[in-house]
Amino acid sequence: MKPLLARLARQLIRWRLAGSSPASLLALGEGKLLKSFHRAARCSPAYRTLLAEAGIDPALIRTPQDFRDQCPVLDKAMTFKRFGARELLAEDIKTRDLASVLTSSGHGGGGFALGLSTRAQLKDTAFTIDLGLDLAFDTDRRRTLLINCLPMGVTFQSDAVCVANVSVREDMACALVNQVGDLFEQIVLCGDPLFLKKVCDHSQDIGLDWRRHRLNVIVGEETFTESFRDYLAGVLGIDPDDPGSGMIGSSMGVGELGLNLFNETRETVALRRACARDPQLRERLLGPTSASMPVPTFMVYSPLRTSVEILYADDNGNGDLVVTLLDPAVPLPLLRYKTGDRARFVSPAQLKQLADAIAPGYLPPALPIIALHGRSKDQLPGGGHVDTFKEALYGSPEIARQLSGAHRISGAANGLCWQVQAARGAEMNLPELTSRLGQEIAPRLPDTPLTVTCMAYDDFQHDKTIDYERKFVYWLPSEQ
């Protein structure tokens, strides 16, 4: 698509979204769901086998509710661990039409899953990415440099912004800001939390003045806390509470399904920050037990691209996140695919009722929202959560500056043990860092016995040489 036509198309989508509601978009998405199912049942050898084993006759799946009530829920073990790529690949996709392969991170265990894209899909990828960037950062109005620091060969295609794929090289990222940043009206920095911490540390070491530029950040790969958002904001010169400032927002993808399936917006960031400040608001929105848990990440999704379910929900509506892609030409049809995350739906009507408590003049997004609680494996014994420790780690920017960002939670005889890696050169401050971290975490877990230790960089044994190419493991249940 030519640049001018693509820009006009994005403006048209913006206009349509402004006049839409979550309910109307969900209804449109429902119309695509059965087409995706019947195509998978017809074209995927692996899915035909799974349906037959479940005793499902595809001809009897006539409504979206039939699909949700009867069809099996898939996961990595049922698909990639059992079937080869030839069985998973839809028969209406030829091998010569495949243009790219993306592996999952392998973080969830059980080996790697694969995401395949065709050449036709890649032609649409740039437009999809550019639409998301424009909705979040007004990239059609501002000349933009996107510095992509994501690992594992994750790259961006764009026809609207200038992209620098530097992977996990903090020196290259900072050099680009220094040398070409002034050519652009804004910079979008993209990476995972642990590496973005390293970029911030390096930039402070070399005296990089981020405030010369309008900065935005896309955070991926894992959940983060509001204290981390505040830490990034303080280094990069961003005000998360000012709509006129740059934005720090998260994006969630699944390697075998696609990038940016869910993302934060300014409205959802405002909602999360309001819930972090006001536990009563959080309880009214998410239920009576929510005040004892970390604030979830509120994210929107396009029901024209994905069908979302929450299964096995508890009394507060929190359950397993299940996704079905609605693309009629996806090479690997993975229907009702369990991502390994915990989430719940957020009611638009409830947001309207609570608007005044969220922010003056607050308007909910046009897209539907989920509250994401992170990976199921991030739940700790006794009801705790890994993000509670992340919140404490960045509770004091002064202390966080002296840490690498890496830490490990493990089971101890009478509670939990929290080992935190200090930054290089902070060895003389270990007793003070240990004390301050203990003060930060204790009020967040008042009923849990804790042992806190801040360790010198080279004495930290858990993934001691962090290469930033792999997701860091903060908690291993097997260590209990």
Image: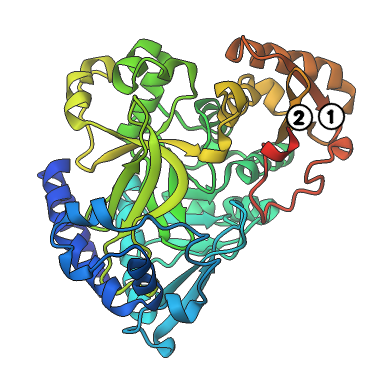
At 53% across and 35% down in the image, what residue appears? 224
Q: Mark 1 points at which residue?
A: 455
Q: Is residue 229 above or below residue 309?
A: above
- Using the rendered view, name the quadrant where residue 449 is placed: top right
**Residue type at numbered disc 2:** Val
Q: Residue 403 in the image: x percent, y percent? A: 74, 31
Q: Residue 234 in the image: x percent, y percent? A: 55, 28
Would you say the residues marked 1 and 2 are in contact, meaning their CB atoms lie under 8 Å apart? yes
Could you give the CA–CA distance between mark 1 and mark 2, rounded to whole angstroms? 6 Å
Residue 109 falls left or right of residue 221: right
At 67% across and 51% down in the image, what residue appears? 170
Q: Mark 2 points at which residue?
A: 420
Judge by depth and name the residue closer to the eye, 248 or 97: 97
**Disc 1 secondary structure class:** strand
Q: Residue 113 in the image: x percent, y percent? A: 53, 64
- Neighbor class of circle 1 (other Cα within 10 Å; few <14, some 14-19, many 20+) is many
**Disc 2 secondary structure class:** strand
Q: Is residue 101 above or below residue 448?
A: below
Residue 294 falls left or right of residue 72: right
In the rendered view of the protein, which quadrant contains the C terminus?
A: top right
Q: Residue 132 in the image: x percent, y percent? A: 33, 53
Q: Is residue 48 above or below residue 189?
A: below
